[in-house]
Image (spheres, grey):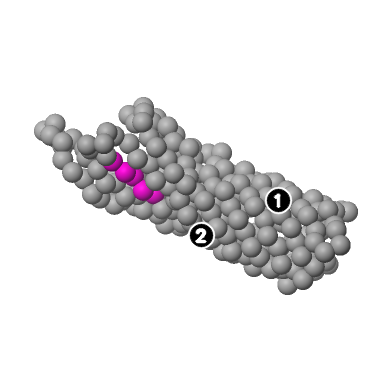
Amino acid sequence: MKKIYLVLAALIITVAGFSQARIGVQVIGNASSVSFQSDNITDAKKSLQPAFGAGLVADIPLAGNLSVRPSINFLQKKNSIKFGDAGQPTEVKTSLNYAELPVDFVYTIPAKAVSFYFGAGPSIGYGISGKIKYRGFAEDENGQTVAVDESVDAFKKEDKGGAGMGRVDISLNAIAGVKLTNGMFVNAGYLGSLRNLAQGDGKYKNYGLQLTVGYFF
């Protein structure tokens, strides 16, 4: 999988060298959270968490005002889930690092000073690393409530002491923004998982609201 991302990154750079295609760089602010369901946790409270991303992007004309915009990014996906009563609160924090490849089909509306654009497409993420931190209370083997403060590898298999989350995250991506004549662009976006990453009966899907600032050379 890692080799695939390296090949795709090289492809973006190569394709952008031809025709009217342009290549650029971008930084991403990701207000990240999670869609979460569990039979054991019914009072979960979630909040948006600040996360960061950056990468390469290309804009490749197709026909008329339509183009395809692939990018290869390093992207953080974070969340915080709180549950339990006020006397024994529990918080689970997750921080995941992905190599993310969105491919958007973009329609541009030219104007005098700026161009407006919007688009959507699929995105594939591969989990590079990640941690899940659990701080709260749990029952031990004797049925006694004890304080717990531990951290586990998110993507390592459960039988090896990890959380066993799936590494491959398949998502839907949507963007809308403006591009200046000097090559700078700004867009807002949404990235939402289509694939359940949890093991067992629970459901866990990443999503995020994004603000991206970049520059096409």
Which circle's residue, 2 or 1, is located before the other in the chain? 2
- Residue assigned mark 1: 176
**Circle 1 Cα neighbour tier, 10 Å, few/some/many (<14 / 14–19 / ≥20):** some
Q: How far apart are the two marked residues, 2 and 1, measured between alpha carbons? A: 19 Å
Q: Does the magenta stretch include residue 100?
A: no
Q: Does the magenta stretch include residue 92?
A: yes
For label 1, the SS is strand
Q: In this view, does 167 lie above or below 142?
A: below
- Kindly identify the residue that appears in the image at 26 percent across and 46 percent down: 135
Magenta-highlighted residues? 90-94
**Circle 2 Cα neighbour tier, 10 Å, few/some/many (<14 / 14–19 / ≥20):** some
For label 2, the SS is strand
- Residue 103 image position (x, y, % from top left): 67, 52
- Residue 184 image position (x, y, % from top left): 71, 67
Q: Work out whether residue 11 can be spotted.
A: no
- Kindly identify the residue that appears in the image at 36 percent across and 28 percent down: 42
- Residue assigned mark 2: 52
Could you say which is closer to the camera, residue 1 or residue 89?
89
Left or right of 92? Residue 11 is right
- Taking the view exactly as shown, the residue that stands out farthest to the right is 64
- Residue 76 image position (x, y, % from top left): 48, 56
Q: What residue type is labelled 1?
A: Ala
Left or right of 65? Residue 82 is left
